[in-house]
Image: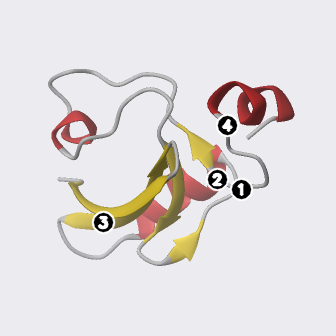
Amino acid sequence: LTRELRDKFGYEEEQGVIVSGVDPNSTAAKAGLKPGTLILEVDRKPVTDVDDLRTAVRDAEGESVLLLVKSGDHARYVVMDIT
């Protein structure tokens, strides 16, 4: 998450991965992710860059992951299928 993206989306001191685009037919879209959503955690483990995110999803056990995401001022947990 660069300083420019923090300023653009209002994530002042947050660390995570910002969603830049979502295929409308993807599992990410079904989980409610949209451009501008900030992914903070995958299965309760912090992610700070795209490599962290990919590794966490790849190493996940089961058919879904628990994501802590933030949109604007609101953070919430969502479940995303990965199969």
Circle nearer the viewer, 2 or 3: 2
Q: Is residue 20 left or right of residue 50?
A: left
Task: Estimate how packed mark 3 is, as few (under 14), some (14 to 19) or many (20 or more) residues with alpha carbons within 10 Å.
Answer: some
Q: Type of residue at label 4?
A: Gly
Residue reaching furthest right? 3
- The N terminus: image quadrant: top right
Q: Residues within 10 Å of mark 1 (few under 14, many from 20)?
A: some
Q: What is the distance, in whole Å, between disc 4 and disc 1 at their CAs?
A: 12 Å
Viewer-nearest residue: 72 or 62? 72
- The residue at which mark 4 appears reads as 10
Q: Are marks 2 and 1 in contact (CB under 8 Å)?
A: yes
Name the residue at 68% across, 44% down: 11
Disc on the earlier residue, 4 or 1:
4
Residue at the spot of label 3: 65
Callout 2: 10 Å neighbours few (<14), some, many (20+)?
many
According to the picture, the residue beneath numbered tag 1 turns out to be 15
Most foreground residue, 8 or 51: 8
- Marks 2 and 1, how far apart at CA: 4 Å
Query: Where in the figure is residue 45, as x and y percent of width and height?
Result: 54, 76
Q: Is residue 22 above or below residue 18?
A: above
In the displayed structure, does residue 61 sit left or right of residue 39? left
Most foreground residue, 40 or 71: 71
As measured in the structure, the alpha-carbon distance from the residue carrying label 3 to the one carrying label 1 is 19 Å
Q: Secondary structure at mark 3?
A: strand
Q: For the residues carrying marks 4 and 2, which lies nearer the camera in this image?
A: 4
Check contact, mark 4 vs mark 1: CB within 8 A: no
- Which numbered mark, 3 or 1, is in the foreground of this view? 1
Q: CA distance from mark 3 to mark 4?
A: 26 Å
**Which amino acid does the dot numbered 1 rest on?**
Gln
Label 2: which residue?
16
Q: Is residue 18 placed above or below 25 in the rendered structure?
A: below
